[in-house]
Image (tube, helix red, strand yellow):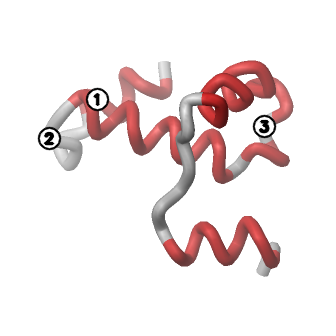
Amino acid sequence: MALQAFTINPLVQKGSEAKQVLDELLVAHEKYLPQFKEKIRELKKQGVISKDPVVIDLMKNGN
């Protein structure tokens, strides 16, 4: 359902962008989303990481 919500958002121009945003959000918020543990593990194996420097800093430092 989350992917559908991103896909129909008028600010998201392509479905592939919606999937990328959702995948990066899941990985970035891993510690708060234990119910998505298996999906996040799969995404990490695929090499999904956040490329946003602010998100990276928050993941490392928690500030």
Which of marks 3 and 1 precedes in the sequence? 1
At horizontal 70% and vertical 49% (from top left) the residue drawn is 29
Task: Please identify the quadrant where the C terminus is shown.
Answer: bottom right
Q: Label 1 belongs to which residue?
A: 7
- Above-or-below relation of 7 to 32: above
Pointer 1 and pointer 3: residues touching (CB < 8 Å)? no
Question: Which percent across, then down, holds residue 37?
Answer: 80, 27
Number of the label disc, if any, that sits on residue 33: 3
For label 1, the SS is helix
Mark 1–mark 3 Cα distance, whole angstroms, equals 21 Å
At horizontal 17% and vertical 34% (from top left) the residue drawn is 14
Number of the label disc, if any, that sits on residue 13: 2
Which of marks 1 and 2 precedes in the sequence? 1
Q: Amino acid at mark 3?
A: Leu
Question: Which percent across, then down, holds residue 35?
Answer: 81, 25
Q: Amino acid at mark 1?
A: Thr
Give the side of residue 54 with respect to residue 41, left or right: left
Q: Crowdedness of circle 3 by 10 Å Cα count: few (<14), some, many (20+)?
A: few
For label 3, the SS is loop
Tally of numbered tags: 3
Q: Amino acid at mark 2?
A: Gln
Question: Which percent across, then down, holds residue 44?
Answer: 65, 36
